[in-house]
Amino acid sequence: MAKNITPRQKDYSQWYVDVVREAKLADHSPVKGCMVIRPNGYAIWEKMQQALDNMFKETGHVNAYFPLFIPQSFLEKEAEHVEGFALECALVTHSGLERVEGEAKLRPTGKLEEPLVVRPTSETIIWAMYKNWIQSYRDLPLLINQWANIVRWEMRTRLFLRTTEFLWQEGHTAHATAEEAEDETQKMLGVYRTFAEDYMAMPVIPGLKSEGQKFPGAVHTYCIEAMMQDKKALQAGTSHYLGQNFAKAFDVTFQNERNELEYVYATSWGVSTRLIGALVMTHGDDNGVIIPPKLATWPVYAVPIFKKPEEKAAVMNVLEPLLADLKKAGIGSRLDDRDQLTPGFKFAEGELQGYPLRLEIGPKDIAKQQVVLTKRPNREKMFVPLGNVVDEIPRVLESIQKDLFNKAKAFRDEHTAPVETYDELRQAMEEDSGFVLCHWAGNQEDEERVQSETKATLRVIPMDGHREEGKCILTGKPSSQRVIFGKAY
RNA sequence: CGGGGCGUGGCGCAGUCCGGUAGCGCAUCUGCUUUGGGAGCAGAGGGUCGCUGGUUCAAAUCCAGUCGCCCCGACCA
């Protein structure tokens, strides 16, 4: 087991903090609640961005950039939206600092006429602009995404999962009809699901949020919900159907084909650096983080083994061309030729940082014309003849990617169980047994009651499957499908 | 904001009760030996003990004030 990492079984949250620190993904910053994303963490984010950005482009979206600051009055225009975000907004009230005679500290100066809000999300400023850009149905749909940082002044933070400032992408689209906007909302949810499952190897449950859990200002909110290894739920992405709420708040109308003036229909959708936390908590183990091959900048971690300089030369002579061939085949690798460190140290560090596949080669292998490949997740070793390495590695990486997904899915399914009564739900939550599937027909108040009594929240109303008649476990009212309750991050 | 804890070399801690020249582990640097699962030995460098004031011959230690951080809860992507 790795040094300096608390085993998951002993203390899961401490394990998470230890892994993030030891794998050098992120560090606490001098500013409370904010993190520094270190190169290892940022590399994962860059791969996520690439994959998502491609999918956004393929579905017809383009990127733009809107400002960090939003006039306070903008935020006040949509009633629910203000309600939802007012308490966590950072405000800019001054434009400068001045030195005052006899005082050591600088003093704010240049008070702004109207305070500026640091965006907690960009709907308001974007819709203020859309008002100018949309006049006719010919201007629609408008499909824009932006990659940005946002600030939400949360009371309690955790690295990646909830930080005061975080990075994300937010898509904001405008449509001529409700149906088209609804289709867009679901389409993007599908993109998120594909990304989570195919790239992150993280199974998710796509579905609808309840009234109480939806985005402030949305008509309804879809989400993908994942289970972490402590059996808690993590909301991994959201897609909102905003109806005409923002169009009305910002007076964005268009002339339709029948020459009538109508309010525009909207969607917004986003995923954030929280996904890095999700990745760690889905696949990590007591030896460190595990990066799925598709999100690894360097899927292969190459460790040459040698004692004497002439051995090093012989090993490098074989290894370097091999890595060059891999690169030609589109597979990145990191060569760890630091010669002050022992192979054992490198093995441990490589595992800690999550390289999916390790390639070892030493004098013994040269003699046998082979390399040793070790899969990160289970340390399975393979001895592969030199001539087959470039063909074999893509296959091995693929199998690692698949195994990670299957393992995570098996874990989730194992800890998802139907319950028929409120007592059973209560008991399941006391035992931390994971997700429960139950019939539900309660309102927001009922949900709050369940939360205060069991700490569980209605995570998601799944979109596929689970359709059947039944009775709500709390109210006894008829219900047509099961929903997922669980404890959440 | 409520409850709890903590500020001592880069990191993690001991020392505080009972005042007397600041210590340990890891990390770092140098040298030699090592290198297929976190190497060994020898030596070296590095600290206004969070800050301000008080008591005292003498304060990391006692007293008063103050600042900051972490954990638990409420809030949340």
Image: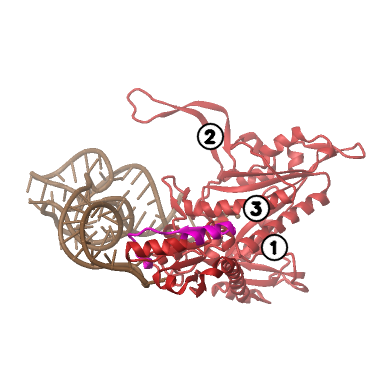
Q: Position of residue A454 (x, y in %)?
A: 58, 68
Q: Colour of chain A?
A: red
User: Badges 3 and 1: C-beta atoms under 8 Å apart?
Assistant: no
Q: Nearer the viewer, residue A343 or B48?
A: A343
Q: Height in image: A44 above or below A473?
A: above
Asked if residue A10 can be seen in this view, the reply is no
Q: Position of residue A141 (x, y in %)?
A: 79, 43
Q: Nearer the viewer, residue A456 or A94?
A: A94
Q: Which residue is mark 1?
A: A206
Q: Position of residue A341 (x, y in %)?
A: 34, 62
Q: Which residue is mark 3?
A: A52
Q: Earlier in the sequence, mark 1 or mark 2?
A: 2
Residue farthest right in this picture: A258
- Identified at 53% across, 49% down, the residue is A154
Q: Which residue is mark 2?
A: A92
Task: Rate crowding at label 1 as few (under 14), some (14 to 19) or many (20 or more) other CA atoms within 10 Å.
Answer: many
A266 relative to A155 in the view: left or right: right
Residue A339 included in the magenta stretch of the image: yes
Q: Nearer the viewer, residue A107 or A44?
A: A44
Q: Which residues are magenta?
A: A320-344
Quarter of the figure with residue A144: top right
| Residue type (three-letter) at the residue carrying disc 1 | Pro
- Identified at 57% across, 44% down, the residue is A150
Assign the N terminus of chain A to one quadrant of the image.
bottom left
**Element marked by disc 2:** strand
Residue A251 included in the magenta stretch of the image: no
Assign the C terminus of chain A to one quadrant of the image.
bottom right
Q: Height in image: A30 above or below A412?
A: above
- Identified at 44% across, 47% down, the residue is A32
**Element marked by disc 1:** strand
